[in-house]
Each structure stands twice: as structure tokens, then as C-alpha cells.
Amino acid sequence: MLDLGLAGRLSHFSVDLDRLSACADEVIATTRESYPDLDIPFHARWRHFAAGGFDRWGTLMQAEPFGDDGLKMGRAAYDLAIVSVLLDAGAGADWAYEEGRTGETYARSEGLAVASFDMFIGGAFSSDPADPFRADAAALAALTADELAAGFQVGPGNPLVGLEGRAALLNRLGQAVSNDPDTFGRGDLPRPGGLFDVLAGEAVDGTVPAPRILDALLTHLGPIWPGRLTVDGVDLGDTWRHPMGPGEGQTAGLVPFHKLSQWLAYSLIEPLEWVGLTVTDVDGLTGLPEYRNGGLFLDTGVLRLKDEADAGRPHEVGSPLVVEWRALTVALLDRLAEVVRARLGLDAAALPLAKVLEGGTWATGRRLARARRPGGAPPLQVISDGTVF
């Protein structure tokens, strides 16, 4: 898709690689402000759990709810991360969450993270009142949109985009976990965190390759995605067709993204490392095709709409325009990472893409959006059901 864009053959976007240098300048400025020592963590859900400078997960760990049982901690961390990331599609510009413990109010991804963390520690995703710090199949399958709305403080004056879709996604997560006991655990309370045992158990010489995390997610959680495109009975999830996409036959035109699955894969790295394992080949995952990274390229002029009127109208997530935008974003993130590393004097081992994103592209996309549009809205409006964008 990037080659098509550079050749001027895409219908909706033109690409100006000469603007990539200025884009890198913006990203580096953000990175140096946030991480002046360039000690950058991975782009993962755990950063949002520390919104406002409050280390919520760390505080929970200080209470030692799992004792010194690393496997129990790892399962709980996976339960929390999986549920929270699946709730992390765009919240919309009009929703916010007020945290009772701190009195702080958070919106967008931080708000979704803090709200889901509060539901987690409150036992909302557990069927066992004696063991609240977990998620399990029964509780997830039974969760209602009204319960999710209550947990997320949704009301007439505080609407959350895609609420019903989010609740349905967690319901399907519960069903998928229940239907796969070999992966998620047998007994009365199988849980998403069973995936931690699977990946930890596969470690070779103490290492787990990051693409294996994504592979496990796509294999074992594939059934949770709402019905869209299928091939041979397999739901493809966050995969869409474009008239100029590659492939033949059933796969003609398919462009896979798996944004939430990859965001989740990034977020499942650290719990493995907390128990002493090493996650390798982090750059085996792609950049995330979401509106902050994509907005970064539009707001810095690397991408331009061929029809400026497209900026003023909403677009379906599966439309050719949005597929082009997201595909170009993934490809350009790799190009941008090379420039950022060169400017900072770091190689890919020291600054993998996951750290460029955190440093980074996502925060710069948000910063530029806030400077250009009321409420920090993205430069394009995408119609979402709460399970993709």
C-alpha cells in the first residue's frame, strides 16, 4: 500500500516522504520531554495504569495479594491486561472517568484504563467474591452493558462510544475462554490469564518470542471478534478488503491489522519479564494502526488527503479510505522509526518499535491533535463499534 501511495495510485491519500524528517523532529521532541534519559518503556497498557503519576498496579503489588507466587501474579496481570485492552477502542470526545481514590478525571485511553482497573480490583470480572483480583469466563460471559456503563460512569451527560459493542466483546471473551479449557484452565473458573501459563510454559532457555504472543492471541481469542470477513469459517477479525490489495481468490484484497490484538501482545510482554523470562523479537510486531499514529502523519504532512472534504465527514472503519490510512500508518511507522533511531544514535535493539511508539509517536499524535482541533479530536472521524479503533 505504501508503494502504491508513493506511486500516486491510491484513491484517497498522497505520501510525501520529504515530510518524514519534520515528523521525526516532533516525535523526538516529545520523547526527550517525556524520557530525557531515553530510558523508554514499551508501549503497553501498563503505562495507562500509571496515569497521573499514580502507579496503581505497583500499589496493588505492594499489598502482596498474590504473596510470592509469580505464576498467580502473572495470571492476574494477564486477566487485567486482556480485559482492559479489549475495552480500549476509542472512547469518543465526550466521555471521562472520575477516579474516586484520587479525585482526578481521565478521558480517552487513560480513562478507559483507570475505569477498567477500578472494576478489576472491585471484583467486577470475577465470579469468586473471595478472589476479586481476577477475571473469569463466567463473570465475563454474564457481564451486561448496564454493568459496564455503571463501572465506566456512563450516562446521558457522559456517553461512551460503542458501549454495547464493548460489553458484547467481553461476553464473547468469556465464551471463548470457557470453550477452550486446555488453554485457559479447567474447572469452574477458567480465565483469560490461563494464557500466561501457556506462554511461560513454552519458554525455551528462558525466552519467549513476541510474535508467539500475537500468534496465541489470534489462535485462542479469534472467536471473540464480531462477524466480519471469514475465510474457510475463520473470522478474520481486524482484517479488511481494499480494491488494490494483494492476494488471489478468497484472500484477494485482504489487508490485516489486528490493532487490538497487537496492542494486547505488547501489553503481555512485561508480566512474562516480571517472572524472569526474556521476550525476544519485539520488532516482530508491527506499529499500531490507530488514529493517534495515523493522525501524526496527517498532521505533519507526511500524508495528505486527495479530497480535503473527506476530513469533514465520518468514514466506516472498513472503507477504502480508512484501510488506506491504516495501512500507510503501519508502513510509515517503520520508516519513521529508522529516522528517529538515527537522530538519537540508537539501534533497533536499544530502541525497538515498541519504544518508538511509547516515546513517541502516539503521544506526539495526541499533542498535535490537541494543538489543532478542539478536544484533541483526530484529523479523520472513523465510525467505530468499540471493537476496532
Image (cartoon, rainbow, N blue to C red):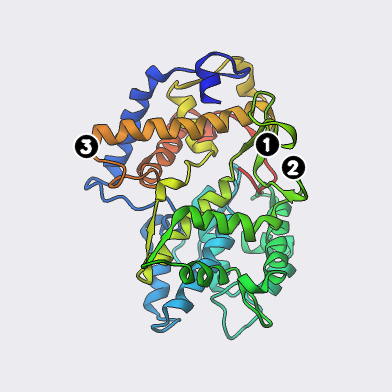
Kindly indicate whether the residue at mark 3 contacts the one at mark 2 (C-beta within 8 angstroms): no
Tell me if residue 317 can be seen. Answer: no
Q: Residues within 10 Å of mark 3 (few under 14, many from 20)?
A: few
Kindly indicate whether the residue at mark 2 contacts the one at mark 1 (C-beta within 8 angstroms): yes
Circle number at residue 345: 3
Residue 82: percent from left, percent from top: 56, 61
The type of residue carrying mark 3 is Gly
Residue 338: percent from left, percent from top: 34, 33
**The C terminus: image quadrant:** top right
**Residue at 52% from the left image edge and 67% from the top image edge:** 78
Q: CA distance from mark 2 to mark 3?
A: 43 Å
Tell me if residue 306 can be seen. Answer: yes
Name the residue carrying label 2.
229
Residue 301: percent from left, percent from top: 45, 20
* Horizontal side, residue 74 vs residue 28: left or right: right
Circle number at residue 240: 1
Q: CA distance from mark 1 to mark 2?
A: 7 Å
Residue 156: percent from left, percent from top: 70, 50
Mark nearer the N terminus (2 vs 3):
2
Front residue of 303 and 233: 233
